[in-house]
Image (cartoon, coloured by chain):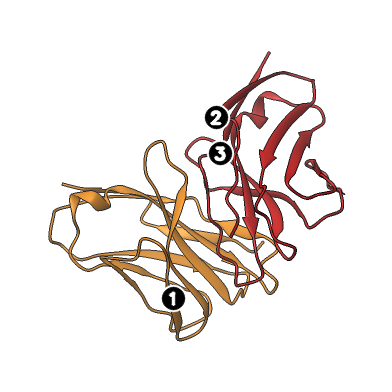
Chain colours: A red, B orange
Amino acid sequence: DAKTTQPTSMDCAEGRAANLPCNHSTISGNEYVYWYRQIHSQGPQYIIHGLKNNETNEMASLIITEDRKSSTLILPHATLRDTAVYYCIVRGNQGGKLIFGQGTELSVKP
Amino acid sequence: DAEITQSPRHKITETGRQVTLACHQTWNHNNMFWYRQDLGHGLRLIHYSYGVHDTNKGEVSDGYSVSRSNTEDLPLTLESAASSQTSVYFCASAGQGFSEQFFGPGTRLTVL
């Protein structure tokens, strides 16, 4: 599975959009981009995933560049409860194994 | 509502003891996973199972074992606990297609 690179930490003002970047320059054609988040001391929570098209659900939007070498998770109106570590994960079709990196620690501030 | 539970939530044990952590899910998922998370690190995969009687080693499987006798449960056993196994352990399950893994609340294990 491809390796991902994320910034260690980011800040965002409450009510503003939070844009979390992820680089996955070695991604292959059949690998999906997944985003999970982990609120302090809790189990990770699935947010969204995509292959090559942009995706949106009730939690967030996922923008994948045309060359698929990077992506951005967008939380449109961040709240204090969105403060968490966000993990960008690239997963192939060979089973459901997730390889977690260090993630981005997002702090939403009032 | 379907859920995934882990027990115990907290455990303290001594070096050399055998410890079993329970994981139970009510989604009827075939796929189950065990991860460990150490302070300041992401999750690392210990073992996983794609169905009854199927088990596979993950990236940090030494010192751990699992068995899958039914769909709902995947217990994780530490054969002889070591201080290096002090960690938070998360269990997860996923349905066909693996589109989303559902994680349990975690078990905090301390080995003294």
Q: Is residue A4 above or below residue A82?
A: below
Q: Quadrant of residue B90?
A: bottom left
A20 or B18, which is in the foreground? A20
- The residue that disc 2 covers is A8
Q: Are marks 3 and 2 on the same chain?
A: yes
Going by the numbered disc 1, the residue's amino acid type is Asn
* Residue plotted at (65% across, 53% down): A26
Q: CA distance from mark 2 to mark 1?
A: 31 Å
- The residue that disc 3 covers is A103
- The residue that disc 1 covers is B56
Dot 2, how many residues are within 10 Å of its Cα: few (below 14), some (14-19), or many (20+)? few
* Residue plotted at (45% across, 86% down): B53
A69 or A71, which is in the foreground? A69
Tag shown at residue A88: none
Q: Dot 1 lies on which element?
A: strand
Of pointers 3 and 2, the one earlier in the residue sequence: 2
Specify the subunit that label 1 lies on. B
How far across and how far down the image is residue B45, in percent?
45, 60
Nearest to the eye among marks 2 and 1: give it.
2
Q: Dot 2 lies on which element?
A: loop
Specify the subunit that label 2 lies on. A
Q: Is residue B110 above or below residue A97?
A: above
Q: Quadrant of residue B29?
A: bottom right
